[in-house]
Amino acid sequence: MFEIFKKRSGKELAAVTDGKCIPLEQVNDPAFAGKTMGDGIAIIPEKNVIVAPCDGVLTMVATTRHAFGMTREDGLEIMVHIGIDTVALQGEGFTVHAEAGASLKKGEPVISYDEQMMKERGIDMTTMLILLNQEDYEVVEMQQDAHVQSGTDAVIKYRTKV
């Protein structure tokens, strides 16, 4: 009833891994670079562990273990996609550390990958963090061209739309 008096507080998503944060437009995949699935950021990883970017429920882990989805308490839905064309690996080289339905805290490990195997196969492990239901949220700020640490550095700041 008094929606206009509710404070639109800022929220943030943390880096899902250590590395260099880049704009989606620089990702070597037209679907992500063109923001077909939604807006967000990408990280060129320096670690092989991918963590939860926020507190929330792990809603989905791909059967191929290369991606997962989460929902925050405020309803924001996100997807984390690990690597370019990694779906073709059919799960090889990935280890899942949390199952769908689990409540996670920001920084908790979700999936890790065999870094050596990916290097040997020449696979681009750039990892994308995508906002899925942007009709309900607006991005206030996105980190770009900076080194970030997983679970601590904010890479996307957003707020609920009125």
Image (cartoon, rainbow, N blue to C red):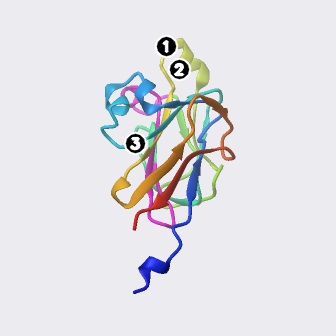
Q: Is residue 155 left or right of residue 33?
A: right
Q: Residue at x 43, y 54 (%)?
A: 138
**Residue 118 image point, x, y percent:** 53, 20
Q: Report which residue position mark 2 lands on.
A: 118
Secondary structure found at label 3 = loop
**Residue 70 image point, x, y percent:** 47, 54
Q: Name the kind of residue labelled 1 in the image.
A: Gly
Q: State yes or no: discs 1 and 3 in contact (Cβ < 8 Å).
A: no
Mark nearer the viewer, 3 or 2: 3
Tell me if residue 114 comes above or below residue 141 in the rendering: above
Write down the region rendered in magenta.
69-92
Per the rendering, the mark at residue 122 is 1
Q: Who is closer to the viewer here, 63 or 23?
A: 23
Pick the quarter of the image with the N terminus.
bottom left
Q: Name the kind of residue labelled 2 in the image.
A: Met
Q: Is residue 118 in view from this perspective?
A: yes
Q: Who is closer to the viewer here, 18 or 57?
A: 18
Tell me if residue 40 comes above or below residue 159 in the rendering: above
